[in-house]
Image: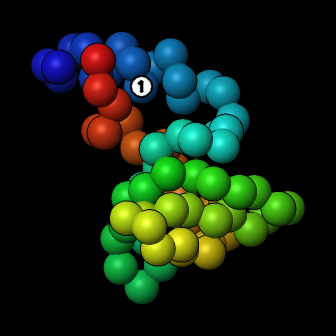
Amino acid sequence: MDAHEREGRAATTADRPLRIGDRVKGYVKREFRGTLVAVQGDRCDVDVDNAWVVCRRCDIERDTDAAVG
């Protein structure tokens, strides 16, 4: 996937809210990337290689770099 394809995919998914199963990236003491598995209010659970990171919604964003075309 080249830069134009990534940019186009990011533009189409950026407007919708995060959903369970989305690939996300974030920072809580260090950077992580994983799959969003649960959202309870402002608390999010992210599966990072079979370990869970619990963070606030404002600590994560959609991981458009991981998008596979």
The percent coordinates of residue 13 (x first, y second) are 53, 24
**Which of the two residues, 37 or 60, is positioned nearer the viewer here?**
37
Residue 49 in the figure: left or right of residue 54: left
Q: Where the C terminus falls, by quadrant? A: top left
Number of numbered discs present? 1
Foreground pick, 33 / 60? 33
Residue 64, position as x, y percentages in the image: 37, 36
x and y percent of residue 17 in the render?
69, 35
Q: Is residue 30 left or right of residue 28?
A: left
| Amino acid type indicated by mark 1 | Ala
**Which residue is most to the left?**
2
Quadrant of the rendered image containing residue 48: bottom left
Residue receiving disc 1: 10
Residue 23 drawn at (x, y percent): 46, 44
Q: In this rendering, is residue 28 above or below 66? A: below
Q: Residues within 10 Å of mark 1 (few under 14, many from 20)?
A: some
Question: Which residue sits furthest right?
Answer: 41
Q: Residue at x 44, y 67 (%)?
A: 50
Dividing the image into 4 quarters, which one contains the N terminus? top left
Residue drawn where x is 66% and y is 27% of the image: 16
- Confirm whether residue 26 shows in the render: no
| Foreground pick, 51 / 26 | 51
Q: Residue at x 50, y 51 (%)?
A: 35
Q: Is residue 68 left or right of residue 9?
A: left
Q: Give the SS element for disc 1.
A: helix
Please say whether residue 39 is visible from this viewpoint.
Answer: yes
